[in-house]
Image (tube, rainbow, N blue to C red):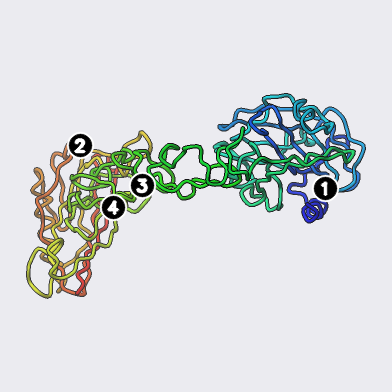
Amino acid sequence: MTGLLSVLCATALVVIAIPSSAATTDVLLAEVLGSWQGDDTVQFVELAITADGATDVSGGTLTFAAKTGERQSFQLASDVSNGTAGTRILVATERAAAVTGVTPDFVLPEGLLAPRSGRLCYQVTNASGDHQAVDCLAYGGFTGDNGAFGNATALTPDDRSLERIEITGNNEDDWRGGLRPTPQNNAGSAVTLATLCGDDHVDEGEECDGTALGGATCESLGFAKGDLACTQCHFDTSACNGCGNGVIEEHEDCDSGDLGGRSCTTLGFTGGTLGCTARCKLDTSSCDPTFFVPGGGPRARDCLAEWRITNGTGRPGKDGKTRLLQRCKDGDSGCDGDGATGTCTFAVAICFDHDDPRLAHGDIGCARASIATWELIAPRPASNGGADAASALLGAVGAVGPSSVVGSIVAFTPPLDPGERCTNTIAVVVPRNRTMTMKARTTGEDVKSRDLDRLKLRCVP
């Protein structure tokens, strides 16, 4: 611990401007024990003074939180006498004092420190009267807010202590497990506890010992498969795999039949069956090759109109995002409908008032309205087939309801009532190595409702 003491003497995590009468901020958490040999009442918190003369800890508070963040506090009621940098302050339960034989500087009530999942902070009151965290340690499966102290360490202080080894401000990097706790009080009285870990026998308080796993397996711990190991007489599940247990866990898109509430249609496809691979990744291969392209960018919510296209190689991703640039390889039957060499024929339609779940914000669905006009901004008449495409698009949209076509604008009279309707499928021909840009503006009956949509079609060799 000598190297750590030199770091503690030179560094503090948080510097807070507080009145001289308030508790010092020159104190850090140094070692924590939550349970010993199966006894959850054997607990201590060891603080380290980081600057000479920092004896004024009266008013400082240890705040304890359970797994989800419920909080309880313990206030240090007096100052300590030894303020030399590196000196320890021991806050321990009466049971810990009896087991270790070391008299604590402060007696810690039982039940405040969660042995297997929680958070502990040393905090003071600043000039504004607010509580400010000087140092915090979150461990185990803690899921609450850890403020500026980084990721919680996965280690737990049961039947081993957590020892500080660094001061980076990230709990995951700053703490390690110690099998021989070393409680020390402010007067320098200390002891090293003897561990039973390492005798290949699962003793009280141990989950395992060496190859002795007490009959436990990855499966018995809730994982689907894998090889369970033992580290510091605690289960090591790093080689266990949760994929296959039917519950979506970290880094999994899905798990067996649990698709996270998603389906082909929620991802933007017209239908099909969404699947989950053996590696817990979403599988859209059985979703329809036809899907919707909002065309308005990631911030757009209006779904007055959307493009609908058939392209087995440009399908939406697992998050439902769809590329505005749709590529087709000349001759690929999954997207090229002409069978001829030198062109790609895309199957495209325009759909009005499609209730696209990808464009909802929470409980608020995408904006839909009666459709007044549809304006084709691109393509313009050109040698690459733009004229034919423009004519086909305008004709298909005009056939959706009573309308008149003036130039590139289709006006519906009366406006189309809200409710999904799509045009017939249009064959849009794009020469090889060329890109056709399609752009249209849809306006609602109230005029203020507008939806600008783009789609680019690229034919590649």
Closer to viewer: mark 2 or mark 3: 3
- Would you say the residues marked 2 and 4 are in contact, meaning their CB atoms lie under 8 Å apart? no
Image coords of residue 254 (percent x, y): 34, 44
Q: Position of residue 24 (x, y in %)?
A: 83, 40
**Amino acid carrying mark 2 in the image:** Pro
Which residue bears the numbered disc 1? 50
Q: Quadrant of the C terminus?
A: bottom left
Is residue 184 found left or right of 388 in the rendered image?
A: right
Depth check, mark 2 against mark 1: the one in front is 1
Say which residue label 2 marks.
Answer: 418
- Identify the disc placed on residue 253: 3
Work out how far the residue at label 2 is from the one at label 4, CA to CA, in angstroms: 18 Å
On the rendered structure, is 342 left or right of 281?
A: left
Nearer-N-terminus badge (4/3):
3
Determine the CA span between mark 1 and mark 4: 61 Å
Q: Secondary structure at mark 1?
A: loop
User: Of 178 and 176, which appears nearest the observer?
Assistant: 178
What distance separates the C-alpha of mark 4 from that of mark 3?
A: 32 Å
| Dot 3 crowding, Cα within 10 Å, few <14, some 14–19, many 20+ | many
